[in-house]
Amino acid sequence: METVLALLVGVLVAAAVYLMLARNVLRFLFGLVLLGNAANLTIFIAGRLTPELPPLVPEGLAAPAGQVANALPQALVLTAIVIGFGLLAFTLVLVYRGYQTLGTLDSDAMRVAEPADTTDGTP
Amino acid sequence: MNESAAPEDRPADRGPGEAAARPAGAGWLPALLPAALAAAFAAALPTIAGGGTIRLAADWVPSLGISFSLLLDGLSLTFALLISGIGFFVTLYARTYLAGHAHLGRFTLYLLAFMVAMLGLVLADNLITLFVFWELTTLTSYFLIGFNHASAASRRSALQALLLTGAGGLALLAGMILLGGVAGSFELSEILARGDLIRDHDLYLPILVLVLLGAFTKSAQVPFHFWLPNAMAAPTPVSAYLHSATMVKAGIYLLARMHPALSGTDAWIWSLTLFGAVTALVASVIALRQTDLKLALAYTTVMALGTLTMFLGAEATVAVAAAMTFLVVHSLYKASLFLIVGILDHQAGSRDAERLGGLARAMPITAAAAAAAALSMAGFPPFLGFIGKELKYEGALAIASEPAVVATAAVLANALMVAVAGIVALRPFHGGRPRAPRTPREAPVTLWIGPVVLAGLGLLFGLAPALIADSLIQPAVTAILGRPETVKLALWHGINLPLALSLLTFALGLAVYVGHERLRRGLIRLEAGLPATADQVWDRLLDGLKALAAAQTRLLQSGLLRRYMFITFASVAVAVGVTLAATGAVRLPAAWPELLFKHWASVALIAAGAVMTALSKTRLAAICALGVVGVGVALLFVMFGAPDLAITQLLVETLVVVLVGVVMLRLPSLEQGARRRRGADIVLSVAVGAVVALTLLAVVGAPLDRAVTDYFETASVAQAFGRNIVNVILVDFRALDTFGEVAVVAVAAIGAYALIRGTRRKERP
């Protein structure tokens, strides 16, 4: 199963990169969400997969009986999901604010910080 | 003192100083420092002549084996005496030459700082100490060459010298670090004792090349010769001091100092002999072409440096003795000639050979000093120059491997020097009625004292060579060769081959002097026919460098987000991909795993959602597809034992879709702007995806270390009294991380709120 999910992460990353290379910043945002998902899955897979057995300690025992799912990557991913959400929310507002101010979603036209070189034609 | 001259009559290299004549009462004070140093060094003469050395050492960076150590032996004493002695006369001279200049104080500071740096360089007994002083001479000479900072030519020359010698300095540093590693010490006295170890080491050749790069750039060997004549933009006292007597000799000093450690190999002999010989010949030909006396002298300096390099390539005692004698000869006559050219400039208003003549009657003392210096330069007896020249010929013939090459180069270069000596020191003073832009007057004593004493020393040492033979030349040769040597200097060597070569030199030199005006016109025509001079090549090199930097900036810093993203992702793909391929970490799975339908279904759902997000043309479809991906990932979490993750993921995905949907009400549709080809984007995204997938396959193919997980599993109940291990990790073992996470979300929320509020305020007038 890890093999298949590794390939799936590849597909997610490819789609994310393709979106992040687009001119429209909203597409860039979608790419960011996909990349976050891909990253979470990567951490999850790296801890190996154990079907149907959550990391819980049964009542009366001091430790899980037998093999359960790896708890460590789960803790990391849980944090990552929330942080990813924070990032997305902020970026979304940034896109919105950028559109309010600049009147465009085209990143090629957002040249306030680095204006186009007027001496020669930029590609 | 000629304080009455109007500013426009002052020498061109003086710069736009205000002639606000200030009382110069304490003007001689700065000259006390070099005088005291010279006296101190002279006091060490008996010790050095007796074969002893003086060493001072203090810890500097003991953890790296770097100490601040100074060593006074024959070689460093010779240099130290020249530096402090000539420094004294130059400081005195500059005070009059630049009298009333607004920045005379600054100039004196630079000059003395340079002198101290140069003394440190020749006295250093530690590679790192030596390098620090080496760089200090580069820096201080930058200030001195660019002293007339209002002139563009000065600034260019200063920068050129700084870049070229600075680059050489970097090469030297690399060479020294290698050398220190090979020899196991940064102390010169220890390194020099391990010559055989260094010469047999694999790194010998890189060390040699790097050290020679440093020495050749500093000492203006072809093809790095062009910065030195350009450095003549500096005021004449600087030219006299830095570019004849001292700084340019730093490279020569380095070659001499490194002689015991690096010399004796074919690579050493041939590179020094060839570079030296070519430099000597090229420079003496170019010297003939000049009409500016200062430039002519500058090129003869390059010629002298070439000669010194050529002789330091040899192992024979007499060749090294010739180099050391010539070093002293050259410093004495070249410093005085430069100072004399400065006097001509200052008193007669020009330093152009074509505009000056017959000045001997008006300026008898200067003319006498010029004659003495020129005769020493041309190598006439009984001047020290004659002894130096005889020794050179003797040394050239004694060099075992290529006596013909060295002797021919030496004879030709010397013959041209005879001619240049005549042009520079005889023509302006003798022959015809006086010609000068200004009525010439004899210089004040502070100007002529330097040339007179220095040229006089050339005569004195020629008449009584024993004065320097035992106390300076012999200890210096001993230091360079690393073994006790005996050197005897004498005016008369008997009738032998060197004497015959001397006569040949005079004949050739006289012939060139007589025909030099015709020769000069020919050379100017020849130069016009050349595709480019070294100086122009330098300009093109700098222009090319700037164009390259501009093109690279345009390419990398385009200001386009997608271009930055492309470069970043491409770098990741290449770096990780190449690493994967190079380390052979790629592991392809042996067999496909047995999967249930639900697994395949969720994987297919996610993949389809991702592809659809990427390709969708409308916003709504994209958001839906995004939601599908999120829910699919949540399903995977459920199937593989992570219910907490699944719950969080579902909540977050729902929020994402809602938030994006709300914001999109206020945004335009996805379609805007012209369509563009995205072939390269597709290739890159597939490449990045493939690299990530391969990396992940390599990761899951390797064994897993569950030590941390095991700890959490056993400690969860025992220490934290919780049965949901994931939750225990988050709120107990890694509680601080979770707190940080909360803080991040809070900051994001505050930031988002601030952004929105800012918008509102702007909308309200």
Image (spheres, helix red, strand yellow):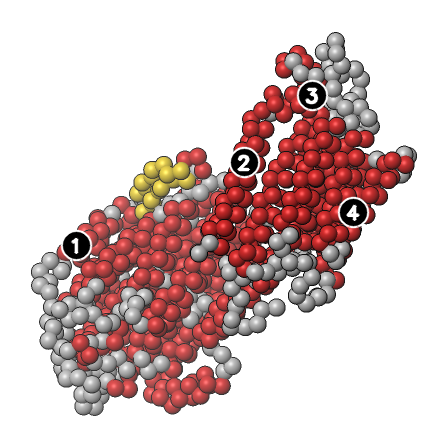
Frontmost of labels 4 and 1 is 4
- Pinpoint residue B141: horizontal percent, then vertical percent: 33, 61
Q: Amino acid at mark 3?
A: Ile
Nearest the eye: A104 or B106 = A104
Residue A114 in sight: no
Residue type of the residue flagged with mark 2: Ala
Closest to the observer, B360 or B11: B11
SS assignment at label 2 = helix
Label 2, on which residue?
B746
Q: Nearer the viewer, mark 3 or mark 4?
A: 4
Task: Please tell me which residue lies in front, B653 or B107.
Answer: B653
> Badge 4 local density, few (<14 within 10 Å), some, or many (20+)?
many
Label 2 neighbourhood size at 10 Å, few (<14), some (14-19), many (20+)?
Answer: few
Crowding around mark 3 (Cα neighbors within 10 Å: few <14, some 14 to 19, many 20+) is: many
Percent x, y of residue B480: 40, 53
Name the residue at 24% across, 81% down: B350
In-image side of B125 versus B434 (left or right) = right
Q: Which mark is residue B725?
A: 3
Which one is earlier in the sequence, the residue at label 3 or at label 4? 4
C-alpha separation, residue under disc 1 versus residue under disc 2: 70 Å
The residue singled out by tag 1 in the image is B32
**Of callouts 1 and 2, the N-terminal one:** 1
Q: Are marks 3 and 4 on the same chain?
A: yes
B113 vs B63, left or right, is left
Q: Secondary structure at mark 3?
A: helix
User: Of the numbered discs in the image, which one, if any, rests on residue B609?
Assistant: 4
Q: Is residue B529 visible?
A: yes
Q: Position of residue B457 (x, y in %)?
A: 22, 64
Label 3–label 4 contact, CB within 8 A: no
Q: Nearer the viewer, mark 1 or mark 2?
A: 2
Q: Looking at the picture, how far across and down is residue B304, in whole percent?
A: 38, 68
